[in-house]
Image (spheres, grey):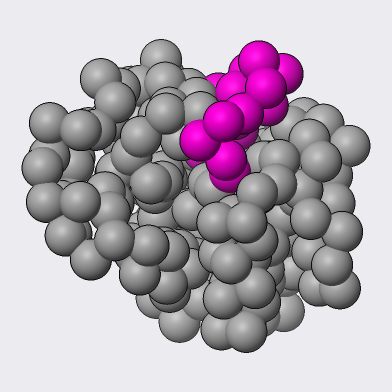
């Protein structure tokens, strides 16, 4: 559990205060007047009140030919990322990518679609910003590099390549709904586990 001192714009956790400018923690005494905060509220504070928001988006990756369950889970993940004030980065097309963008849009969030081809009109209708790269499947490497971390929903050959690239680049990869069972992927049972997992990763606790 986090604690917020809103008047001084300080986030506390486990006897430490978060320094957003340097993205580290230092020992500090908890103020008398402060309010409890859950992981979503802690990251909302970072993104909207700290003055030093995380600029990197959160990559949500998964197959074009996704099941209805995977698309629904991707939408939940996109909504959670959007609620935290973070941007979603996806491949911009159908399946898991469309689910993630739809979830972000539903909460007023931003969904960046990194398209493999040169036509921005190929983006699904929920994408906020379509980037038509024209570099084909090489855009998988860009998603892996650009994301602060990756959330893999389901599995496919293309998704596996993004997972492998992310792990090679030292990115945290969270897995949902049948994501690849490879070393380094942190599997979550449901999207409800994402807020705490993202807070641990992005706030380095």
Q: Which residue lies at the image location 72% right of the left edge and 18% below the top edge?
A: 69
- In the rendered structure, the answer to whether residue 178 lies left or right of residue 106 reads right
- In the rendered structure, the answer to whether residue 65 lies left or right of residue 97 reads right
The picture places residue 58, in percent across and down from the top left corner, at 48, 53
Q: Which image quarter holds the C terminus?
A: bottom right
Q: Is residue 179 above or below residue 135?
A: above
Residue 30: image quadrant is: bottom right
- Observer-nearest of 200 and 145: 145
- Observer-nearest of 86 and 51: 86
The picture places residue 72, in percent across and down from the top left corner, at 63, 18
Q: Which residues are magenta?
A: 62-81
Q: Which residue lies at the image location 57% right of the left edge and 30% below the top edge?
A: 65
Residue 169: image quadrant is: bottom right
Residue 72 in magenta stretch: yes
Q: Is residue 124 above or below residue 19?
A: above
Q: Which residue lies at the image location 78% right of the left edge and 35% below the top edge?
A: 177
Q: Is residue 54 visible?
A: no
Residue 29: image quadrant is: bottom right
- Observer-nearest of 71 and 3: 71
Q: How many marks?
A: 0
- In the rendered structure, the answer to whether residue 187 lies left or right of residue 75 reads right
Residue 80 in magenta stretch: yes
The picture places residue 56, in percent across and down from the top left corner, at 38, 63
- Observer-nearest of 188 and 183: 183
Majority secondary structure of magenta residues: helix
Q: Which residue lies at the image location 42% right of the left edge and 28% below the top edge?
A: 94
Q: Is residue 98 visible?
A: yes
Q: Which image quarter holds the N terminus?
A: top right
């Amino acid at each position: 559990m986090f604690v917020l001192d809103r008047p001084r714009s300080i986030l506390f956790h486990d006897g430490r205060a978060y320094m957003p400018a340097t993205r580290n923690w230092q020992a500090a005494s908890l103020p008398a007047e402060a309010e409890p905060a859950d992981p979503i509220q802690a990251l909302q504070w970072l993104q909207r009140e700290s003055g030093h928001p995380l600029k990197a988006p959160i990559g949500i990756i998964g197959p074009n030919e996704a099941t209805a369950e995977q698309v629904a889970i991707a939408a939940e993940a996109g909504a959670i990322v959007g609620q935290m004030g973070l941007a979603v980065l996806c491949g911009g097309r159908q399946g898991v990518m469309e689910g993630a963008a739809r979830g972000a849009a539903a909460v007023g969030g931003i969904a960046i679609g990194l398209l493999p081809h040169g036509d921005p009109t190929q983006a699904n209708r929920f994408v906020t910003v379509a980037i038509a790269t024209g570099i084909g499947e090489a855009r998988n490497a860009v998603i892996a590099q650009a994301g602060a971390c990756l959330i893999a929903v389901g599995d496919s050959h293309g998704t596996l390549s993004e997972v492998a690239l992310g792990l090679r680049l030292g990115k945290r990869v969270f897995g949902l709904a049948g994501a690849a069972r490879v070393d380094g992927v942190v599997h979550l049972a449901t999207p409800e586990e994402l807020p705490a997992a993202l807070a641990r990763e992005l706030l380095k606790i």
